Image: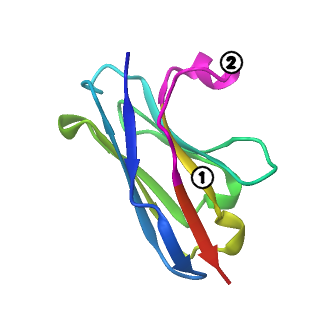
Amino acid sequence: QVQLVESGGGLVQAGGSLRLSCVASTSIFSIELMGWYRQAPGKQRDMVAAISIGGSTNYADSMKGRFTISRDNAKNMVYLQMNSLKSEDTAVYYCWAGRPVDIVQGTGYWGQGTQVTVSS
């Protein structure tokens, strides 16, 4: 069982930046994928970005060039640097851990979420 705890959310003006952090309760050396999802009010939860053990990354199209995911396996941490924030980035952001099949099945481990609000 992996517990994930997010931090770093808050209120920011459009064009600003935030850095989200997620700490895992266990070593993430063996966790194939770490990632971030987000869910806006009335919408489904969508993947924002994911990073593999080896550091390969994937981003949703609307985040490319603005968001950067990273992981520190030694500290059991994963981060999401968000720049040039837009009002449509307002959502609850969830840390996630799992395998590629978990992305398809909607499973894996989830944090409780952290609210990001971007004011225009």
Amino acid beneath label 2:
Gln
* Depicted 112 relative to depicted 11: above or below: above
Point out the stretch of residues depicted in magenta. Answer: 97-114
Amino acid beneath label 1:
Val
Among numbered discs 1 and 2, the one appearing first in the sequence? 1
Does the stretch in magenta take in 74? no
Q: Residue at label 1?
A: 92
* Depicted 67 relative to depicted 102: above or below: below
* Depicted 58 relative to depicted 105: above or below: below
* Spot occupied by residue 19 in the image (x, y as percentages of width and height): 40, 63
Does the stretch in magenta take in 104? yes
Which of the image's four quarters has the C terminus?
Answer: bottom right
Of badges 1 and 2, the one in the foreground is 1
Whether residue 83 is visible here, answered yes or no, is: no
Q: Residue at label 2?
A: 105
* Spot occupied by residue 30 in the image (x, y as percentages of width and height): 31, 19
Label 2 residue SS: helix
Label 1 residue SS: strand
- Residue found 37% across the figure and 27% down from its top: 3
117 left or right of 23?
right
